[in-house]
Amino acid sequence: MEESKKVIFSGIQPSGNLTIGNYYGALKNWVKLQDEYDTYYCIVDLHAITVKQEPKELRRRTLEVLAIYLACGLDPEKNTIFIQSHIPAHSEAAWLLNCFTYTGELSRMTQFKDKSARYGESSISAGLLTYPVLMAADILLYNADLVPVGSDQKQHLEITRDIASRFNNLYSPTFKIPEPYIGKSGARIMDLQHPEKKMSKSADNPNSYILIMDPPEVIRNKINRAVTDTIGVVKYSDDQPGIKNLMDILSVATGKGIDEIEREYEGQGYAKFKKDVGEAIIEELLPVQNKVKEYLNNKDLLEAIYTKGSEKANYVARKTLSKMQRKIGFVAKSR
Ligand code: TRP
């Protein structure tokens, strides 16, 4: 029954081209949730503009992220797929929630501290500070039970829970308190040049990441250049973070277990291993890339899909927003 399904909300920013970190860490797992849960998958363009974006690129990437969602297997009949800026309630609820959030707690957020250090004092927007409040609005508007997020987003989910409880306590129960969703098989893909860091689409060196849309020869080159070590054995060990990461990638791409991979490459050095990692990624991504291109050549279909998604999203979001407005004490609009 529709009503008894738990609600899942997640989103990806169209602030850079998506990487295999997004693919293996999020998208591939989202697809597995689409039957069991009532899922909302958003393209969070309002979040993307917290740092400078080129308008043309932002528009292109927003549609590309949508095409990637679909190409990875998210079915628009089973999931509510939409673009954040199409739902005015996100901005409106974020303002309201801003007034129940303290500047102290926002300025202590790790991501804010990191990003503001990176972009420099004079170019830090207020949006970068209040980013977690918009994220709280995203989640709370849909009464999400579960939010699949990477470990870097745990703190944002924590503050969402704090803001929701604060509002509930001040007025009366309004928001569901969301929990993180910890996937069974989600892989955390690390930076190919600095395997102690998570792979990120905003890394400075393109050899740090593999994009979902990278052509085969680029993937081969990037895997070839991936940092390893001088130990020379394919072993899953914290002393070999580069190799460990490549093993994780090979494992999620092929379904082979880590033990199996260790056995397969025993006494072989890194050359063949790296070659196989590259080919496994290519084999998995090629069909996805072809579908993305097909979708991008069919803008009418994309438009129909995001329009349908925004109708459902808008309905649910507006309901929660009205509830918030009423509890806060705003005079109801005449209909
Ligand atoms: N902040 C998230 C990220 O950068 C993206 C995001 C925005 C999100 N709103 C969300 C994720 C709501 C989960 C739920 O990864």
Image (cartoon, grey):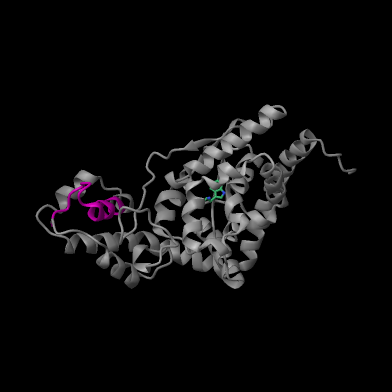
Left or right: 305, with 187 as reference point? right
Front-lying residue, 300 or 64: 64
- Residue 142 point in image, percent of width and height: 64, 40
Left or right: 92, with 254 as reference point? right
Q: Residue at x 30, y 59 (%)?
A: 280
Place residue 204 in its image quadrant: bottom left
Quadrant placement of the N terminus: top right
Place residue 171 in its image quadrant: top right
What is the total number of numbered labels drawn onto the structure image? 0
Q: Residue at x 37, y 63 (%)?
A: 210
Residue 203 part of the magenta-drawn span:
no
Q: Residue at x 47, y 61 (%)?
A: 118
Residue 78 appears anywhere in the view: no
Residue 240 part of the magenta-drawn span:
yes
Residue 97 appears anywhere in the view: yes
- Residue 144 point in image, percent of width and height: 59, 38
Front-lying residue, 99 or 34: 99
Place residue 7 in its image quadrant: top right
Q: Which residues are magenta?
A: 232-250
Quadrant placement of the C terminus: top right
